[in-house]
Amino acid sequence: MTEETRDRLPLTGWDLLIIGVLIVVTVLLAGGLLPDDAHTGPAIVPILGLQSAIMVGAVWAVAIWWRGASWASLGLRPTTLRWCVRAALIALLTVPAVSLINLGVNALMHETFSNPQVEFVAGVGTDWMGRLGMIAVGGIVVPVVEEITFRGLLYGWLRDRIGLVAGIIVSALIFASIHAIPPLIPALALQGAVLAIVYQRSGSLWPPIVLHAVFNSIMMFGLFAAMDSGAIPSTAFIHP
């Protein structure tokens, strides 16, 4: 991606902080209105939808409405079918890589790690409508929103100010840390770096969105298959 093919984001560090605070505060407020068992049943899907709406709403309010950035400057530019196919193939390669890292971290801990993301996705149970809803939200909506937020906004802003390599590393570490699950940080950081590189190379957010969507969907289908076979869901399954 060259200077001619992208716009510098007209945001300050304070703007990013405001967006982050808006997301955290509104997500916490929304969570406080939910019943205690909402995260273990059918309500999981609308919860994910609500969180995604809050994230993209905060980005729109500060970056688009207040600062005058465009969706194109956040990476939502046309791409090619070839790049989308490449992204899908890269997702197939990152699934075993991320799973191995996750299993390696679990082995180093010398104890079984209970992955809350697995428990969250598995909360829809065996209901096919719930599973389809989870795949639609977790496999489509969440990737679009997270790529706009973490690659289009965060990585794009960092790249303009600290450089390409540092921007990839720092944005990947923030992406991993924001999930607040320490054992998953190495795997999530790898995935964040791959997504940022694909965005940088393609010049558009659509290829990393495809990569993210394919990755999440594979993980969820694998988790549901493990559940149906009676197996205990593995910590290899993550949902970034």
Image (cartoon, rainbow, N blue to C red):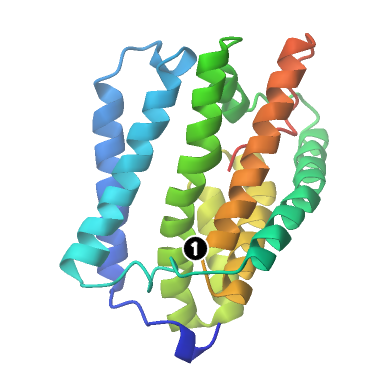
Residue 179 appears anywhere in the view: no
Q: Is residue 103 left or right of residue 34?
A: right
Q: Position of residue 19 (x, y in %)?
A: 28, 56
Residue at image coords 64%, 53%:
211
Residue farthest to the bottom? Answer: 4
Secondary-structure class at tag 1: helix
- Where is residue 175 shown, x and y percent of the image? 52, 54
Q: Residue at x 64, y 64 (%)?
A: 81
**In the image, is residue 54 above or below residue 88?**
above
Compared to residue 155, the image places residue 58 above or below, namely: above
- Left or right, 163 with respect to 100, comes to left
What is the quadrant of the C terminus in the image?
Answer: top right
Residue sitting at x 49%, y 78%: 159
Q: Which residue is under mark 1?
A: 151
Q: Residue furthest left?
A: 66
Counting from the top left corner in percent of width and height, residue 174 is at 51, 57
Inspect the image, locate mark 1, and give the three-letter code of the amino acid beneath it. Arg
Q: Nearer the viewer, residue 113 or 48?
A: 48
- The answer to whether 33 is drawn above or below residue 142 in the figure is above
Q: Residues within 10 Å of mark 1 (few under 14, many from 20)?
A: many
Q: Splitting the image into 4 quarters, where does residue 239 fall?
A: top right
Looking at the rendered image, the quarter that the N terminus falls into is bottom right
Give the residue drawn at x 54%, y 75%: 203
Left or right: 193 with respect to 28?
right
Instruction: List the single residue furthest toward the front.
Output: 81
In the picture provided, is 40 more to the left or to the right than 65?
Answer: right
* Quadrant assignment, res 14: bottom left
